[in-house]
Image (spheres, helix red, strand yellow):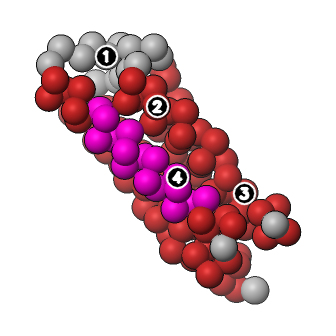
């Protein structure tokens, strides 16, 4: 369990703490924090799929926290996940306009976590 508290796992831990609750909100109550209305079963299905994807990645990040042999793959997946979300949101801002404040904050947070993950990855590779 000593590995759990290393600085190089902090990025993964922060991501898990944020992504797991957000996944359940997306899956079961997207209108709780977001200006989203689910009108069809297909829309509900898409949000449940996003929930599943988020939970799958969070599970992998937990594995990377607990098992050092999975750390590299977990941190790389986290970097791509965060930068992917941020990139998509930034593209949306250019094409669709500015979203609500919570999504702007999310974009900033995803970008920060992506860069922090990259920093930790590079630092660990150098040591």
Question: What is the span of residues highlighted in magenta in the rendered image?
Answer: 47-62
Q: State the residue position of label 2.
A: 24
Please tell me whether mark 4 sits on a helix, a strand or a loop. helix
Above or below, 127 relative to 36:
below
| Mark 3 nearby-residue class (10 Å; few <14, some 14–19, many ≥20) | some
Return the disc, 1 or 3, that comes first in the chain's sequence.
3
Q: Residues at badges 4 and 3 in contact (C-beta under 8 Å)?
A: no
Q: Give the residue at mark 4.
A: 58
- The residue drawn where x is 51% and y is 74% is 73
The answer to which image quadrant residue 45 occupies is top left
Q: Earlier in the sequence, mark 3 or mark 2?
A: 3
Classify residue 46 as left or right of residue 74: left
Q: Quadrant of the rendered structure where residue 1 is?
A: bottom right
Residue 104 coordinates in the image, percent (x, y)? 47, 29
- Give the spatial CA distance, label 1 vs label 4: 23 Å
> Which residue is identified by label 3?
10
Q: Is residue 123 visible?
A: yes
The answer to the question of whether label 3 and label 2 lie on touching residues, with beta carbons closer than 8 A, is no
Identify the residue at image location x=45%, y=36%.
Answer: 23
* Residue with the mark numbered 1: 36
In what element is the residue under mark 2?
helix
Q: Position of residue 67 (x, y in %)?
A: 66, 73
How far apart are the two marked residues, 4 and 3, measured between alpha carbons? 13 Å
- Quarter of the image that includes the C terminus: bottom right
Mark 1 or mark 4: name the one nearer the start of the chain. Answer: 1
Image position, residue 16 (x, y; %)? 60, 48
- Report the residue at 54% width, 68% height from top: 74
Q: Earlier in the sequence, mark 2 or mark 1?
A: 2
């Amino acid at each position: 369990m000593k590995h759990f508290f290393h600085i190089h796992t902090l990025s993964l831990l922060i991501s898990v703490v944020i992504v797991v609750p957000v996944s359940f909100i997306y899956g079961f109550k997207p209108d709780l924090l977001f200006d989203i209305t689910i009108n069809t079963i297909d829309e509900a299905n898409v949000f449940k799929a996003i929930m599943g994807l988020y939970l799958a990645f969070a599970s992998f990040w937990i594995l990377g926290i607990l098992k050092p042999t999975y750390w590299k793959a977990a941190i790389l997946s986290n970097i791509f996940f965060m930068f992917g979300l941020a990139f998509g949101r930034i593209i949306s801002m250019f094409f669709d306009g500015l979203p609500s404040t919570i999504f702007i904050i999310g974009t900033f947070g995803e970008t920060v976590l992506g860069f922090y993950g990259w920093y930790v990855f590079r630092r660990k590779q150098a040591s």
